[in-house]
Image: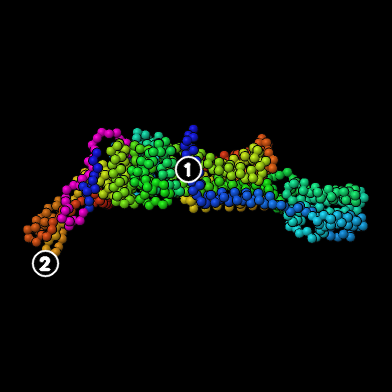
Amino acid sequence: MPRLNMLMTLMQREAMRLIKNPSALMLLGLMVTFSILLVLSRSEKKPPIGCWIVYPDAFDSFPQGEFKSDFLKTLSQQAKQNRSIRMVPMGQVPKLREQRVYPPLTCAIELLELPGSSEGAKLSIAYRHPGTKSEVLEPFLRWFWPIAVDHFGQIAVQEKAPAISRPLSAATLVMEKLQSGSVGDLMNEDLAAAIQLLIIQFVACCQLMVSFTSQDRERGTLTALALSPITMTELMQAKLLFHLGLAGVGSACVIAVLKPVALANASLWVTLLLTGMGLCSVGLVIASLSKSQSSASLLALCYMLIGAVVFYLATRFSAFATLKSFSFEHYSFGMIYVSLQRSIPLASAVDLRPMLALVAVWLTAANILFRTRGWK
Amino acid sequence: MRFPSPTRNHRRENPLSATSSISNPVVPVPRTDERAESIVIDRLTVKYGSFTAVESLSLNVRAGELFGFLGPNGAGKSTTIRVLIGTQKPTSGRVEVAGFSLPKDFARVKPLFGYVPDAENHVEEFTGRENLVLFAKLYGIPLSEVDKALGRLELSEAADLPVRTYSRGMRKKLLIAREILHRPSILYLDEPTANLDRHSTDVVRKLLRELAANGTTVFLTTHDMEEVEQICDRVAILCRGKLVECDTPVNFMTRHAERNVLVQFEREGVMQRESLDLDDDESRERLATIIRTEACVRLHSQEFQFEDVFLKLTGQAYS
């Protein structure tokens, strides 16, 4: 059993090192500054969400020409009264990979086709909205709908922000949003908070763990500690507890500032804890494998680069997608993002299970390496 | 317990000096006692791949003994110490420290010894005092001991300065202060007086003698032969991983000393010098002839230093 006084002494030592280490403090300061900037940007008066009514270029080729013209004329007149609404021909909307791209904070109501037959829907439309909340469309729909119903009676909603409104698949979320090209406002608050939380976990658990442990190893301080009455288990536990605690405090601050309601989400904290433990283990493995600080930094950089390359290739080749699923970070980001939005019952959070298994593997590797060679 | 006074110590002297003497230096008298053996090394062998760092080394060090462990670079001294402190597993052989077997009982041996490495390993960001307080807490000893240890090593004034501002000598002294905090029964030191000034060297040597007098087994490696002569009860010389000889410095000197005389004389108006071995009949004859027939100006005994013994023994081992 680890002795509490030993753990406290070792954690106090780590805390004192952190306080006296300017570069580590700067990194943490950067995190805090970033959070404050996010909050400040949120508190600023945001520009109102606009809406584009996008109609086909070939006006005259529309069936029921006059009828159609009347509809557009009515819309135009209404749009003139509401400055946030613009009538835009489809050809003027820029495209990226065959997807229409709209400016940030802009909704779109696309008039896609006007079937000539009297049977079925006479108007087909597609909605687009920024971010994940379709409620932003409501003011425009409230305005658009009566006019449309008045003119056409029956309307087919063909598409409603397809990529965004689908249930979240965390791993593919970012790429899908980028590929859709239909939403200008790619960065929402939850996404920013999730990225921020992941960075904090990485800095506190991996970067500082690698930095402190490899520095200790290079100087021989770790050997001096290991030769004192503390056990290897206590030494390792103190390191894990300190870095997890640091990440926990940092995460709590960020969540309290950016999304206070998520503080009560158990799934979020479990995900953060597992992510932190995984990253601490990665840090210990890296520090145990390298004999100097510089080689540890190089190894950490390689780990990040390999991760980034695998994640990128996974979007293109299915083999890499399988490889990606062996990384706990693959699950953690999605879980953090989803848990920020809503509380997930732990029993139904399927991503936690592979994550737990992967973290356990890293922890075991760290334990073995640290005991056999990490402290010498 | 008497401590060797610097004025009485054996010094390397100018052979032409009129005050030189051929008498044996004053060294601590080895204690012939029946005290318990603190360190037992029995046929220890350590191999790194195909390279044998230590080969079948057998040594016993008694409790309260100040033991010098000498050898040229790469002789296997550090490897032996690493085995004794439990950071290196022996390839074969038996090692017992304070009655516990290593590496099996490493956890039980740890609190019993202190280890002053050659390279300092402080937490650079901390002050000297903070470094000692950390270890005092880990060993569960009162913090008042920290001030005492700092005082003994004359570091009280610099105690609250960050270690990164310390000189190399101060860092070394802080290491020693850290390792004597918990009053270990065995103290391993790797070149304890390297980088120390003359005064600090004396302080450390005096401290080591005090510790040994109080029952601490002091096991030190050094390249300072003067130190060995001055403070060590017994000395082991290691070369190429093998034990060359183990005895008291006095016995080493007695057994291996060469009695030489430097004679300076004038022949045909030219000053000449010759070094003659008194154990050699031909040289003795030559000395007698010089004294009888030449104008002998000076006659000096040439003392055989411990360093000469060391070089002789390690040289033999190499040849």
Q: Quick one: label 2, few (<14), some, or many (20+) residues within 10 Å?
A: few
Residue A316 position within the rendered picture, expressed as x and y whole percent measured from the top left: 67, 52
Tell me what residue is drawn at x 54 percent, y 48 percent: A207
Report the predominant secondary structure element of the magenta stretch. loop
On whether residue B29 falls in the magenta region, the answer is yes
Q: Position of residue B133 (x, y in %)?
A: 42, 41
Disc 1 is placed on an element classified as helix
The residue carrying mark 1 is A13
Number of residue marks: 2
The percent coordinates of residue A358 (x first, y second) are 59, 41
Q: Which residues are magenta?
A: B13-41
The reply to whether residue A36 is visible in this rendering is: yes
Q: Residue at x 71, y 52 (%)?
A: A45
Which residue is label 2 attached to?
B269
Q: How far is the residue under mark 2 from the one under mark 1? A: 76 Å
The quarter of the picture where residue B86 lies is top left
Tag on residue A303?
Answer: none
Three-letter amino acid code at the position of disc 1: Arg
Q: Is residue B247 visible?
A: no
